[in-house]
Image (spheres, rainbow, N blue to C red):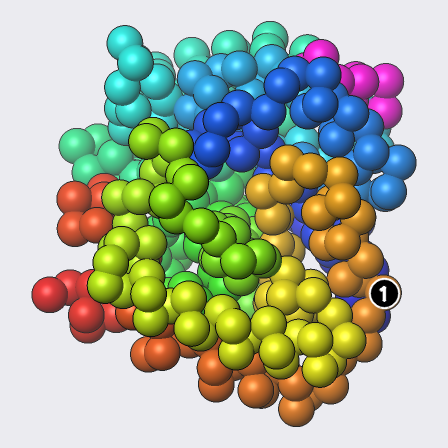
Amino acid sequence: MFKTRQLADQEVMSIGLGCMNLSHAYNHPTPENEAKVLIQKALDLGINHFDTATLYGFGTNEALLGQSGLKARRADIFLASKCGMAGVNGKRVIDGRPETIKKQCEESLKRLSTEYLDLYYLHRRDFNVPFEDSVGALADLVKEGKIRHIGLSEVSAESLRKAYAIHPVAAVQNEYSLWSRNPELGLLQTCEELGVNLVAFSPVGRGFLATQLNISSFPEKDIRLAMPRFQEPQWQYNETLYQQFLQLAEEAGCTTAQLSLYWLLAQSNMIIPIPGITKVPHLEEDVATIELTLTDEVLAKASRLINQQTVKGSRYAKATFAEIDTEKFPEELA
């Protein structure tokens, strides 16, 4: 039902591949040979939208993609990366200065073994740098032919409008899923109005909506451990929600990951989810979503069961909320 979507000026599979988890943030990095097999399998299944960033693995994620056979099929692939947030001396640093953006772009092009990027996002808005300067640097890169389209990540509708007034924005990449509804506070409507894609990261709730998670098995550096939703006592309650969600998916004849992705795709034809997949069976499962047909009743039940009000705990800790520019629910402002 949802086989393809228009992303900027290119037709892509309606589900892209978020590559972060192969090198960064959750669990342990996927062994390089396994990661390359997964990327090749994604190509074989028809995925042609790959998303990475300077930050992921502090450059190793981009290098992985650059060594995974994408170059031979470059004309058919929509390749996206991000700037403005990187690893500096082992720490994550937000830096939206024009000179940093342009330097990071050059480095990304080399690591990805490509002459241009189809889409280049400002990974985070740097509140210490005039927003117009950061967006202007991206516009310069378009003029220079190093990127084809500009994007923004974790921004509000207001910031999107400000950026769009400087240069057309092709996509906004924000967190959106059944359990993270912030784009519904105005961003999604603005994207539809301006013709901007909403690329949804963490579309299966950082794994919560895809499988029964055991947080005690998470490595110490897993970023989810710092998120209130994955902490007690919130986690114990959220686990019971997942069990109900699993029952709903089974009754609908699909997996919980498929129900989550299908629900997102049904919200707007501007939405393209990019699940962070690290295992081939999960890749095949997620891609199979585009062949499903689920009823409006099932989607409505899913939405009533998992939403901002039913989930316990905010999506980020307060310190992280201070770094992002998205609309926030009242409980996230407390």
| Quarter of the figure with the N terminus | bottom right
Quick check: 36 above or below 227? above
Residue 269, image x, y percentages? 67, 67
Magenta part of the chain: 66-73
Q: Quadrant of residue 83?
A: top left
Residue at image point 48% right, 58% down: 208
Quick check: 244 above or below 273? below
Residue 199, image x, y percentages? 56, 52
Give the structural element (helix, strand or loop) at label 1: helix
Identify the residue under disc 1: 291
Quick check: 293 above or below 21? below
Residue nearest the viewer, comparing 320 with 207: 207
Residue at image point 80% right, 18% down: 69
Q: Is residue 74 left or right of residue 31?
A: right
**Extreme-left residue of the structure:** 334
Query: The residue under label 1 is which amino acid type?
Result: Glu
Residue at image point 24% right, 58% down: 232
Residue nearest the viewer, comparing 146 with 287: 287
Residue nearest the viewer, comparing 91 with 165: 91
